[in-house]
Image (cartoon, grey):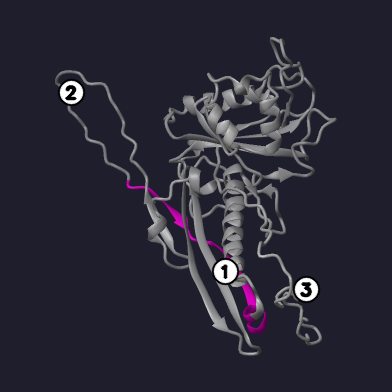
Amino acid sequence: MAFKVASGYTNLPNGNFSPVIYSQKVQQAFRKTSVAESITNNDYFGEIANFGDTVRIIKEPEITVRTYSRGTTVTPQDLDDEDFTLVVDQANYFAFKMDDIEEAHSHINFESMASDRAGYRLRDQYDQEVLGYLSGFKQSALSTVADTANDVVSGSKAVDTAGSNELLSSMTLKKGDFGNITTSSAGDHSIPLAVRLPGATAAATATATPLQVIARMARLLNQQQVDTAGRWLVIDPVFMELLTDEDSRLLNNDQVDKGALEAGLTLGNLHGFEVYVSSNLPSVGTGSATSGDANQNSNFGVIVAGHSSAVATASQINKVESYRDPESFADIVRGMQMYGRKILRPEAIVTAKYNAA
């Protein structure tokens, strides 16, 4: 028999904590694997302590090489000591209440389970925000402007020629970058993707294939002299589906580590990229799965590739505490995560917006 509940009391409303006949097993929600922590440089992790902290990062000086002739006076170059900033300007929190009676009569440690879930939700929110930032979008379940273009510079730009999203326009792939797509719509629209049919020697005239897009992303990084070791690529589930339909080429051992594919989390050695699959990438409008129009510019997904040195993150769960609720017999548990993120090398990040044609 459940205890009486005061009018308006909504905490744990099902009364599932009276010691009656409840299963000893608790159904837990699915967890997504965090990607942001795997692809970013967290060397500055220990250098933040408070919200609003700023980490100043010194840029490597550019050196000028000149021709020399015997007898020429050598003129030394003055080194620039430029820097840019990583600002801890993001913070999220959780808070929940555990009633004493419910806790005493519970057959599970519900407070511990809820705390574990809260920690996961903080990490997931962090993943959404960082992947959105890298893709040039405000991607956040907590934001009222989710899936809109990012136009706010965090700290100072690493490269003056970068846009307000801190990315280089030359490293953003769109429909007009693929010459075989001959449709008349604007070249800055999303790339219409279709798989190459078995036995076909080329993609359809009005589309590109997933492997073509990945190969082009690799080429752009090669042209920027980005190291091959440490490259990563993050794709969404729709792109992953198209990729695995690509004439079964993804399953070729020359293209990918089959054991990693079977694990379902990451792929390895695909055009030199360690590939991650994440549902936390930006999905604009009705998303990348929208078909029927080969040149969507309002419904598309975004994928992003880069190098492990391209982005710095500084994150920590600054405070987790438990205290007595002064107005009831209950404990309140709350926690907060502070973090900052900074694009250090925009020439080492390439994005592509696409839709399934």
* Contact? badges 2 and 1 (CB < 8 Å): no
Horizontal and vertical percent for residue 81?
32, 47
Question: Is residue 170 at least partly visible in the picture?
Answer: no
Q: Which of marks 1 and 3 is nearer the N terminus?
A: 3
Identify whether 190 is placed above or below 317.
above
Name the residue carrying label 1: 112
- Residue situated furthest bottom in the rendering: 327
- 3D distance between C-alphas at marks 3 and 2: 87 Å
Q: Earlier in the sequence, mark 3 or mark 2?
A: 3
Amino acid on which disc 2 is placed: Thr
Q: Which of labels 2 and 1 is toward the front? A: 1
Amino acid on which disc 1 is placed: Ser
Name the residue carrying label 3: 14
- Residue situated furthest right in the rendering: 292
- Kindly identify which numbered label has been placed on residue 37: none
Q: Residue at x 73, y 26 (%)?
A: 193
Horizontal and vertical percent for residue 189?
73, 32
Q: Which of labels 3 and 2 is toward the front? A: 3
Name the residue carrying label 2: 72
Q: In this view, does 87 lie to the left or right of 4?
A: left
Q: Earlier in the sequence, mark 2 or mark 1?
A: 2
What crowding class fits label 1: few (fewer than 14 Cα within 10 Å), some (14-19), or many (20 or more)?
few
Q: Which residue is drawn at 58% across and 58% down?
A: 120
Numbered disc 2: secondary structure: loop
